[in-house]
Image (cartoon, rainbow, N blue to C red):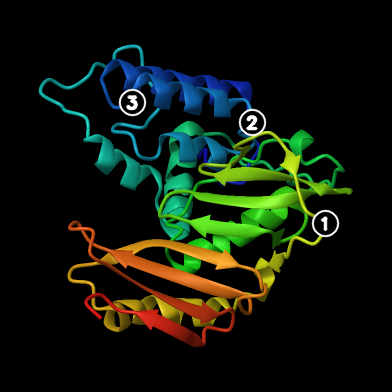
């Protein structure tokens, strides 16, 4: 009996064509707007595995390979954009499960050994690094942060940044260009990495931070304790920033909470999770 390959299996052109057909159908029936469709279609060429392809469609309704006789069910309605975004940017565990399911949908081949993933190469020019297609996790969790650090290391070969700010579905960071410490480039992280701006001048004494120094267990505890420390009514974590040591103090993590009324509170902690200062709402 034919069984599917695992999500780590390298994708074929036939698999990519099937996913493109799904994206076209999702655009036609209103699940994706033109920009979303074009972005995901562009990423198809860089998707190397069945798991990469699964992440492109795992939030779509009826995300299965199209059949000639298949039609859109009468009365079906696409999810609203906010719901689609939440589905699309799931946490790491859920994304992995979805990738496994999607791999079952995409292929039904006889057993065969999976091809090993290529080793990450280190290059001198950051702008020349090949795209790395990843399923963006919920970054405002310790698990999401850990996945970001892992993806960052796979992309750049290190975990050093000048600065980093994380929202729920994307992150922005600045880093020096390899072999050019007087040049910096700002990147975005949202379903992969992409330069946000052209390289600019960078001071040679710009402080840096190694993300590997962040105690991820302590970060999980810090995020869990933030609501009780900051007292924001019905608040949620809005963003996390990680800053290197400078004249104003040691390297730190800042957590900001807010609610629908823009009521907010924040805290600053060390990379080891020690709370250095809090600004609770209403105080």
Asked whether, in this view, residue 160 is left or right of residue 103, the answer is right
Asked whether, in this view, residue 78 is left or right of residue 51, the answer is left
Q: Which residue is mark 1?
A: 204
User: Residue 51's spot in the image, x, y percent?
Assistant: 54, 43
Q: Nearer the viewer, residue 150 or 49?
A: 150
| Callout 3 secondary element | loop
Q: Which residue is mark 3?
A: 32
Q: Nearer the viewer, residue 10 or 136?
A: 136
| Callout 1 secondary element | loop
Say which quadrant the C terminus sits in.
Answer: bottom left
Tag on residue 46? 2
Vertical side of 19 occupied by 142: above or below? below
Q: Nearer the viewer, mark 3 or mark 1?
A: 1
Asked whether, in this view, residue 63 is left or right of residue 185, the answer is left
Tag on residue 113? none
Vertical side of 99 occupied by 244: above or below? below
Sooner in the amino-acid sequence: mark 3 or mark 1: 3
Asked whether, in this view, residue 264 is left or right of residue 194, the answer is left
Sooner in the amino-acid sequence: mark 1 or mark 2: 2
How far apart, in angstroms, are the residues tagged by discs 1 and 2? Answer: 34 Å
User: Residue 172's spot in the image, x, y percent?
Assistant: 55, 49
Tell me which residue sits at (43%, 18%) in the image.
21
* Mark 3–mark 1 CB contact (< 8 Å): no
How far apart, in angstroms, are the residues tagged by discs 3 and 1? Answer: 44 Å
Residue placed farthest to the top in the image?
A: 68
């Amino acid at each position: 009996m034919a069984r599917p390959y695992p999500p780590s299996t390298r994708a074929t052109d036939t698999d990519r064509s099937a996913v493109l057909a799904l994206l076209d159908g999702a655009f036609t029936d209103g699940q994706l707007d033109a920009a979303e469709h074009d972005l995901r279609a562009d990423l198809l060429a860089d998707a190397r595995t069945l798991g990469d392809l699964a992440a492109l469609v795992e939030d779509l309704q009826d995300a299965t390979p199209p059949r000639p006789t298949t039609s859109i069910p009468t009365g079906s309605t696409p999810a609203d954009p906010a719901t689609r975004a939440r589905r699309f940017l799931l946490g790491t565990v859920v994304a992995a499960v979805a990738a496994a399911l999607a791999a079952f949908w995409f292929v039904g081949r006889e057993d065969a050994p999976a091809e090993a993933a290529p080793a990450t190469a280190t290059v001198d020019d950051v702008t020349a690094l090949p795209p790395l297609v990843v399923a963006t996790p919920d970054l405002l969790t310790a698990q999401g942060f850990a996945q970001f650090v892992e993806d960052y290391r796979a992309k750049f070969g290190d975990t050093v940044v000048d600065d980093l700010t994380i929202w729920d579905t994307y992150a922005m960071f600045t880093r020096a260009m390899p072999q050019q410490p007087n040049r910096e480039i700002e990147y975005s992280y949202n379903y992969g990495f992409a330069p946000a701006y052209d390289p600019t001048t960078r001071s040679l004494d710009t402080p840096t931070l190694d993300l590997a120094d962040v105690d991820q267990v302590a970060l999980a505890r810090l995020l869990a304790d933030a609501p009780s420390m900051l007292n924001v009514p019905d608040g949620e974590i809005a963003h996390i920033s990680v800053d290197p040591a400078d004249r104003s103090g040691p390297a730190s993590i800042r957590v900001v909470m807010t609610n629908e009324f823009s009521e907010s509170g924040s805290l600053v902690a060390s990379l080891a999770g020690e709370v250095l200062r809090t600004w609770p709402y209403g105080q």
